[in-house]
Image: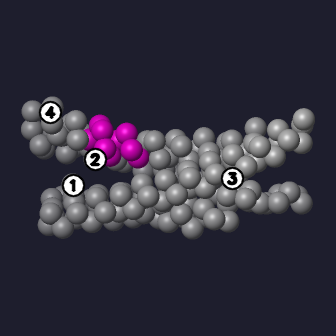
Amino acid sequence: MSHRFPALVAALWWGSLTTIGFLVVPMLFAHLPSPTMAGNMAAKLFAAQTWVAVVCCVMLLLVSRPRHGVAQYPWARAAMLFVLGGLLLALLNQFGVAPRIVARQDLRLWHSVGTMMYAAQWGCALAVLWQTLRTGAHAAVEERSVSD
């Protein structure tokens, strides 16, 4: 059962990025009366998404640590760079890029940078999810064969 928790956290991280970035925010711009209103709401959603990402990444970091003679999860070594990269991208996007977008400072440039960073974070989350599911499936098979 414990091997499923990292996959659940990674799925929450990747799923929330996917839902906010590829579904909700485009719908805001399609259905709200003005781009300014949609942009303000999108900024709030992306800020909330940052905190979801931070919590998920911290949970993955805590869960991946080896404890009291228990070996590190098999996925942890392969995914750790992606967890740290995704966490860094989320924080840089929120505190470095987003304020420039909100201030409309060279909007085209900063929006492009933010979009690329969001896409890279999405890729990091997908890589972590893939690793946790891949090694989690192996752990589940081994667990079943031991219990039989």
Specify few, some or many for label 3: CA neighbours under 10 Å numbering under 14, 14-19, or 20 or more. some
Q: Which quarter of the rendered picture does the C terminus lie within? A: top right
- Read off the residue under disc 3: 135
Residue 115 vertical position relative to residue 48 in the rendered view, above or below: below
For the residues labelled 2 and 4, the Cα–Cα distance comes to 14 Å
| Mark in front: 4 vs 3 | 3
Q: Which of the two labelled residues, at mark 3 and mark 2, occupies the earlier sequence position?
A: 2
Give left or right: position of 93 versus 75: left
Q: Is label 1 in contact with label 2 (beta carbons under 8 Å)?
A: yes
Give left or right: position of 123 versus 108: right
**Residue type indicated by callout 4:** Leu
Q: Which residues are magenta?
A: 17-25
**Residue type indicated by callout 1:** Val
Kindly identify which numbered label has been placed on residue 32. Answer: 4
For the residues labelled 1 and 3, the Cα–Cα distance comes to 41 Å
Q: Which of the two labelled residues, at mark 2 and mark 4, occupies the earlier sequence position?
A: 4
Q: Is label 1 in contact with label 4 (beta carbons under 8 Å)?
A: no
The picture places residue 128, in percent across and down from the top left corner, at 56, 55
- Read off the residue under disc 2: 43
- Read off the residue under disc 1: 102
The picture places residue 143, in percent across and down from the top left corner, at 83, 42
